[in-house]
Every structure is written in C-alpha cells, then in structure tokens.
Amino acid sequence: QVQLVESGGGLVQPGGSLGLSCAASGFPFSRNWMYWVRQAPGKGLEWISSIDTGGATTNYASSVKGRFTISRDNAKNTLYLQMNGLKSEDTAVYYCSTNSLGVPRGQGTQVTVSS
C-alpha cells in the first residue's frame, strides 16, 4: 500500500525559504518518477515539479522555476522540495505523489507565505 507522508511546512515571510520532505513507503520508490503538487485555497491541484528515478532529470512549472529545487534520496525513500524566494501566491497545501495528477498523495503539509 502506497504511503506518502509530507512534512516541513509552516509560516514564512515573503522572500523566505522552506524545505519540504516526503517519506515514501509501500512501493518501489527508486523505480518511480516522483512529483510535487499543491493546492491553493479555493483552487484545484497544480503540478509544480517532477524528478526521474535517479534524480538526473527534473521539471518545474513556470510559476516555481528558478526558485524551487526538487531532489530525492533513494537510500532513504525520501523526496525533497527546497523552496526559496517564497511569494504569497505559493501559499498552499503541498503534496508529494507518484504522478502529476496527485493520485495517490499524502495528507499534505501547509505552507503559508505572509508578512
């Protein structure tokens, strides 16, 4: 059974940084592309980043490119998202997933960017 547990969210001021983690279990993590998606208040799920099995290929939505960095540690079955230069529009619940549609996904971690 796929289990994904996100952590690391919180309240941060505009321009600040946060690092998210996603602990994965119940499936062959190292053989799966992994994804981060987010859901802002009142909006649908938005794909923001993906990474290939070995970590060599990464993709980003235009809204986060140049500010966010996705990475993974296959030995620890963990996915990461380093977020720098945070903006108010980055406020959302962030999820990791095994696909860009966000299904399945964990319980999410709230990121709030506000002064």
Image (tube, rainbow, N blue to C red):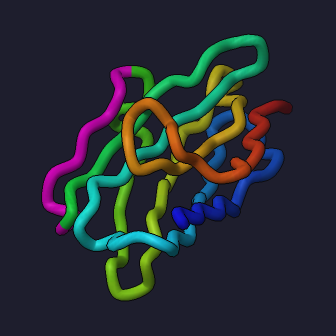
In the rendered image, the quadrant that contains the C terminus is top right
The residue sitting at 34% across, 21% down in the picture is 62
In the rendered image, the quadrant that contains the N terminus is bottom right
- Residue situated furthest bottom in the rendering: 75
Left or right? Give the position of 76 relative to 54: right
x and y percent of residue 13 in the render? 76, 40
x and y percent of residue 23 in the render? 56, 71
Q: Main secondary structure of the magenta part?
A: loop
Res 93 → quadrant: top right
Res 31 → quadrant: bottom left
Q: How many marks?
A: 0
- Residue situated furthest top in the rendering: 42
Q: Which residues are magenta?
A: 54-62
Res 40 → quadrant: top right
The residue sitting at 67% across, 13% down in the picture is 43
Left or right? Give the position of 98 relative to 92: left
